[in-house]
């Protein structure tokens, strides 16, 4: 199943969500692939840190490169297809090319998480079109809700199912914020992740927060949601998880 993680603007936490949820699902034994759907500014490589994959999604039509060559197993513990970090590759493929690899993507793992760009352009549209379901990420601010609503409307127009919304960077008044988000977006609230400086700090060490600070509030929030998605039981403080 292809799940695209989208929003209405940048900076709300999509890429960190995709990277950490991908690691978490893999930890829980789910065959997971994370994909940089942002063809100009893919961030997944930087969030997971080195080593960086040699092949990127921009190589998809290069001579002698197969789809399997693009899939890199990152030592942090998840399969990924990264977007190139080089400015020279920004126009190497067009967003429409994502549709061309949709079938291969959907067969590459049981759950494929696609990280969408923050802007509402052609690239985002293609990441929505290839999805079986969309997760919307928003911060608890009206500007984020209104932009996310636009993305939801585009997904609806293209007949893509909305799985639900993730509220990220929640500081306080969670109950009120949850109510407002529901009113604005009219989608199920999948999870609420706290504002946590460890997310930013971990990037200073070139590691995803789930690996760098596994007991941080954000990591626990990711694991709680990942456990639901993976259908495993997870208790905070316990390292082990059990398949139901
Ligand atoms: N829950 C959180 N708490 C604090 N900072 C966060 C949280 N989630 C993401 N961030 C930070 O917000 C910024 C944007 O995150 P990112 O995942 O790149 O967002 P997007 O992909 O939506 O542009 C980064 O500096 C990241 O470290
Ligand atoms: Mg991003």
Image (tube, helix red, strand yellow):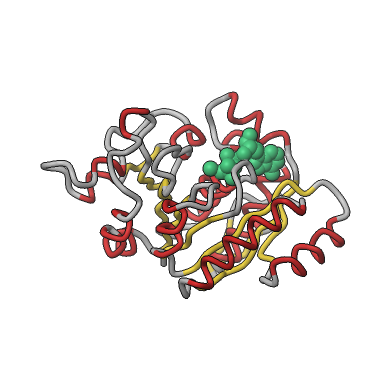
Q: In the image, what residue occupies the spot 32% across and 55% down? A: 96
As rendered, which of 166 and 61 lies closer to the eye? 61
Q: Is residue 90 shown left or right of residue 198?
A: left
Residue closer to the observer: 228 or 142:
142
Q: Is residue 27 above or below residue 41?
A: below
| Residue ID at (40%, 53%) | 33
Residue at 69%, 52% (x, y): give it.
Answer: 144
Considering every residue shown, the one lying at the far top of the view is 204
Residue 37: percent from left, percent from top = 42, 49
Question: Which is more toward the observer, 57 or 73?
Answer: 57
Residue 23, position as x, y percentages in the image: 50, 47
Horizontal side, residue 170 vs residue 2: left or right: right
Quick check: 180 left or right of 208?
right
In the orientation shown, which residue stands out farthest toward the left? 64
Quadrant of the rendering where the C terminus is positioned:
bottom right
Q: Is residue 50 above or below residue 25?
A: above
Q: What x and y, as percent, mark residue 202? A: 61, 30
108 in relation to 203, above or below: below
Give the quarter of the image for residue 125.
bottom left
């Amino acid at each position: 199943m292809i799940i695209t993680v989208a929003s209405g603007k940048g900076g709300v936490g999509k890429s960190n969500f995709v990277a950490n949820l991908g690691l978490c699902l893999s930890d829980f034994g789910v065959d997971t692939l994370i994909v940089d759907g942002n063809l100009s500014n893919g961030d997944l490589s930087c969030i997971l840190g080195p080593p960086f994959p040699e092949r990127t999604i921009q190589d998809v039509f290069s001579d002698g490169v197969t789809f399997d060559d693009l899939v890199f197993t990152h030592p942090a513990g998840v399969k990924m297809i990264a977007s190139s970090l080089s400015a020279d590759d920004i126009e190497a493929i067009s967003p429409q090319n994502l549709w061309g690899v949709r079938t291969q993507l959907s067969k590459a793992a049981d759950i494929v998480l696609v990280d969408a760009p923050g802007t509402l352009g052609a690239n985002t549209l293609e990441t929505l079109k290839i999805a079986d379901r969309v997760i919307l990420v928003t911060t608890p601010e009206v500007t984020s809700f209104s932009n996310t609503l636009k993305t939801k409307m585009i997904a609806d127009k293209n007949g893509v199912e909305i799985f639900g919304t993730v509220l990220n960077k929640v500081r306080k008044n969670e109950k009120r914020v949850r109510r407002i988000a529901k009113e604005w977006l009219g989608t199920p609230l999948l999870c609420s992740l706290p504002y946590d400086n460890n997310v930013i700090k971990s990037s200073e060490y070139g590691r995803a927060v789930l690996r760098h600070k596994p007991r941080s509030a954000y990591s626990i929030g990711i694991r709680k949601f990942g456990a639901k998605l993976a259908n495993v039981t997870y208790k905070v403080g316990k390292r082990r998880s059990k398949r139901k």
